[in-house]
Amino acid sequence: MTDEKIIQMDMGTLTGDVCDNRPALCLGIESSCDETSAALVDSNRNILAHIIYSQIPEHQKYGGVVPELAARAHILAIDAVVNQTLARAGKNIDDIDVVAATAGPGLIGGVLVGWMAATGIAQSAGKPLIAVNHLEGHALVPRLRATLADGTDAPRGVEFPYLLMLASGGHCQILLVRGVGQYELVGQTLDDSAGEAFDKVAKMLGLGYPGGPIVDARAQQGNPKAFRFPRPLCDKPGCDFSFSGIKTAARTFLERAEMPLTEKYINDFCASFQAAVVDCITNRLENALKDERVRHGAPQTLVVAGGVAKNSAIRAAMEKMAIKNNMIFAAPPMNLCTDNGAMIAWAGLENYAVGKVVHEPIAPRPRWPLTEL
């Protein structure tokens, strides 16, 4: 990476004006796992263009993401994805005010591809560069677009502060979101993430990849009481999660099962597994709502984000919990739950507005906790 400094341009504001009384426009690039994505988003919360190249076909036969294949696919796709995004919006680099890209956490090979592409664009065009934490992208995307419990859209996104359940293939956390860069960790997984547990169970059943949506669909046709899965930590105080025991129970059940598995068995298995995960999440969230830090923060909105936020049972359970606690329930639209460039562009704009611009070369990070922001 070059030693040349990134030039800082005049600051825009989220409602506001750059040099010609127009909204700030950000190009966001995401490449932390198995999606190569770019988006153009403005500070008035408009998504002008959004392209996602999914690598699912490359990884399906392996039942999960292979880091080396992912990095290679990002290299092959990144230029086309960025160029198609600009073309779809009818824009060129000169029209952009700021460039943002994921700088971690994630699979470091993929992160490097997106970050170096963004660095090259910013340096060649003299644009400010924002290093976005991938988790912050998920945490802030409900402020760009959010779907409320009644299915309508929140016109201006979610307001600070809010209580966030961030669940994906690699992360599972409860966070009090006070503002940009202000995240208080209330609870987290001690072992596996919820998304990883879904994918592993789908792989055990031979259902394919990605497993989460398949398990959710099969669960809707099954009996959630057919199998007695454990609910780790649900009888303990605190807000931390553990999903490894549920995964172990799944393996034990399947070792005892008669083969081949019937369709009914698979549906009941998925429903029972999913019910256990939902119970764990709601139990930990109930404890979080009683936590003194959360009570003092007084969030009015309960939010779920990340890839697991697409799960119908989790959304329904959290919506019910929000109503019970006189809170608003919100989640990103389905197309903004999984990794995407729009969330990175929006997080870039939010960080740009508070002056977090890269001035010196930085090293992308495979691990980057939100609390370090």
Image (spheres, helix red, strand yellow):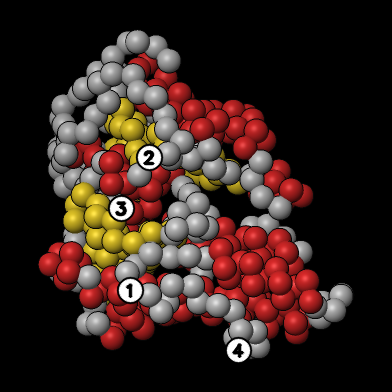
- Asked whether the viewer can see residue 158, the reply is no
- Give above or below for 68 relative to 250: above
Instruction: Say what amino acid the circle numbered 4 marks.
Output: Lys
Residue bearing the label numbered 3: 140
Q: Is residue 291 left or right of residue 343?
A: left
- Amino acid carrying label 2: it is Trp
Residue denoted by label 2: 368
Sequence-wise, the earlier of marks 2 and 4 is: 4
Cα separation, mark 2 vs mark 4, equals: 39 Å
Residue 62 is situated, as x and y percent measured from the top left of the image, at 74, 48
Mark 1 or mark 2: whose residue is earlier in sequence: 1
Mark nearest the camera among 1 and 2 is 1
| Helix, strand or loop for disc 3 | helix
Q: CA distance from mark 3 to mark 4?
A: 36 Å
Q: Residues within 10 Å of mark 2 (few under 14, many from 20)?
A: some
Disc number placed over residue 237 in the picture, else none:
1
User: Hey, which quadrant is residue 189 in on the image?
Assistant: bottom left
Q: Amino acid at mark 3?
A: Leu
How far apart marks 1 and 4 lie (CA) works out to: 25 Å
Going from the N terminus, do you reach mark 1 or mark 4 first? 4
